[in-house]
């Protein structure tokens, strides 16, 4: 017995053995942490790899199951994923009114803020939408997205970043502005950047971030025949943690009336040593709202743009962002943030530019 005790003591005093114990404890704590309330909330493991989109559910299915917990102090963390229904019936034939959307979403609070009434959300997501003068798009967007997010049992807010004026649209700069303003509002776990004309078709496509890689959610858009247009495509709907967003210095501020910022951001992600987590095509399906602009917009998404990202990304982004905040207004279904992001630079005529280079 004494001999055995000597062996045990010698192992404890061995530096290598102590290092092994420390590493083992660290791994054990990490496993416990990732299972806690702050861990990434992912889609249920029982999601089938083939889904029948010919059999769809109404987007408001199961929301009637949500009722206020009798005692908020005793609420448990949200765990039940069985309220998700998978493929959703999406149509733009009838324009929903604001009053109808409000009545169908009774737990959405002023400013488009929601937290589950029956449990404690495991994840907080800020949905940031660059916007200008697309009211019909917005009504469809709000009608479908609110119940979609509620079935995922998220604590969320929808921020509409409204560009003032009539100059060229700058989606990328609006996203930077939205991130800055949203982070003033709350300590969000995830920044969900979302075009107003894209509607998700499957609620198993969870609107949360990955701790290690930015996520691309809209991998299969109907106007692109539900196929991936090119390998570096990163457009439409994507999710980054605040830390990831700042690591890549956000979006460029210099893309006016252009879709090339998506390729710029994909290259930034690669330059800082991160990968992209792409949602499988069978989950990442979206319908594009079509009021006569969808064909042209879809055409712009079919090929990568030429960028100068390697030379500009460290100086063009969140660290160079300038804008003027004009108004912050809480509407029943969204938080409207109106901003003046300045004017596009005036470029010289092509012929004059060539003469100056000569």
Image (spheres, rainbow, N blue to C red):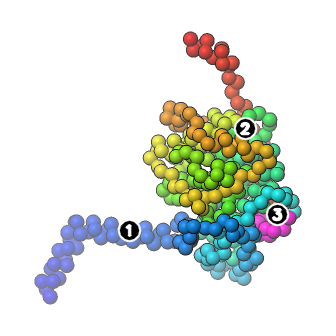
- Identify the residue at the far left of this view: 3
Residue 27 numbered mark, or none: 1
Disc number for residue 101 = 3
Q: Foreground residue, 208 or 48?
A: 48
Q: Position of residue 145 (x, y in %)?
A: 72, 61
Element class at badge 1: helix
Does any portion of residue 207 appear in the rendered image?
yes
Q: Which mark is residue 123?
A: none
Q: Are marks 3 and 1 in contact (CB under 8 Å)?
A: no
* Residue span colored magenta: 100-109
Q: How many marks?
A: 3
Dividing the picture into quadrants, the one containing residue 357 is top right
Rate crowding at label 1 as few (under 14), some (14 to 19) or many (20 or more) other CA atoms within 10 Å. few
- Mark 3 or mark 1, whichever is nearer to me: 3
| Residue drawn where x is 16% and y is 78% of the image | 7
Residue 169: numbered disc: 2
For label 2, the SS is loop
Figure quadrant of the N terminus: bottom left
Question: What residue is shown at x 68% (from left), y 67% (from top)?
Answer: 54
- Whether 206 is drawn above or below 173: the answer is below
CA–CA distance between discs 3 and 1? 46 Å
Verify whether residue 193 appears in magenta. Answer: no
Is the C-beta separation of discs 2 and 1 under 8 Å?
A: no
Q: Position of residue 124 (x, y in %)?
A: 63, 62
């Amino acid at each position: 017995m004494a001999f055995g005790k000597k062996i045990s003591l010698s192992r404890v005093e061995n530096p290598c053995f102590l290092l092994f114990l420390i590493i083992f404890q660290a791994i054990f704590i990490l496993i416990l942490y990732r299972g806690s309330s702050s861990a990434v909330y992912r889609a249920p493991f029982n999601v089938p790899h083939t889904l029948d989109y010919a059999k769809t559910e109404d987007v408001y299915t199961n929301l009637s199951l949500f009722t206020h917990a009798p005692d908020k102090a005793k609420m448990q963390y949200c765990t039940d994923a069985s309220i998700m229904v998978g493929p959703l019936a999406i149509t733009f034939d009838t324009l929903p009114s604001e009053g109808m959307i409000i009545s169908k979403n009774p737990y959405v609070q002023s400013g488009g803020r929601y937290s589950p009434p029956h449990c404690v959300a495991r994840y907080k997501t800020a949905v940031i939408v660059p916007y200008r003068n697309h009211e019909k798009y917005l009504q469809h967007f709000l009608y479908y997205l609110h119940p979609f997010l509620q079935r995922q049992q998220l604590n969320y807010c929808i921020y509409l970043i409204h560009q003032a004026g009539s100059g060229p649209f700058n989606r990328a700069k609006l996203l930077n502005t939205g991130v800055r303003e949203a982070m003033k509002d709350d300590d969000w776990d995830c920044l969900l950047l979302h075009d107003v004309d894209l509607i998700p078709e499957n609620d198993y496509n969870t609107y949360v971030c990955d701790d290690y890689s930015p996520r691309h959610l809209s991998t299969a858009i109907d106007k692109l025949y539900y196929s991936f247009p090119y390998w570096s495509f990163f457009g439409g709907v994507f999710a980054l943690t605040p830390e990831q967003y700042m690591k890549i210095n956000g979006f460029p501020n210099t893309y006016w009336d252009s879709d090339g910022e998506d390729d710029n951001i994909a290259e930034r992600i690669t330059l800082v040593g991160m990968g992209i987590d792409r949602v499988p095509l069978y989950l990442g399906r979206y319908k594009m709202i079509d009021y006569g602009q969808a064909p042209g917009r879809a055409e712009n998404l079919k090929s990568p743009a030429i960028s100068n990202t390697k030379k500009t990304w460290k100086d063009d982004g969140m660290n160079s962002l300038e804008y003027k905040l004009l108004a912050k207004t809480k509407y029943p279904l969204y938080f409207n943030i109106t901003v003046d992001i300045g004017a596009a630079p005036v470029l010289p005529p092509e012929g004059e530019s060539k003469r100056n280079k000569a």
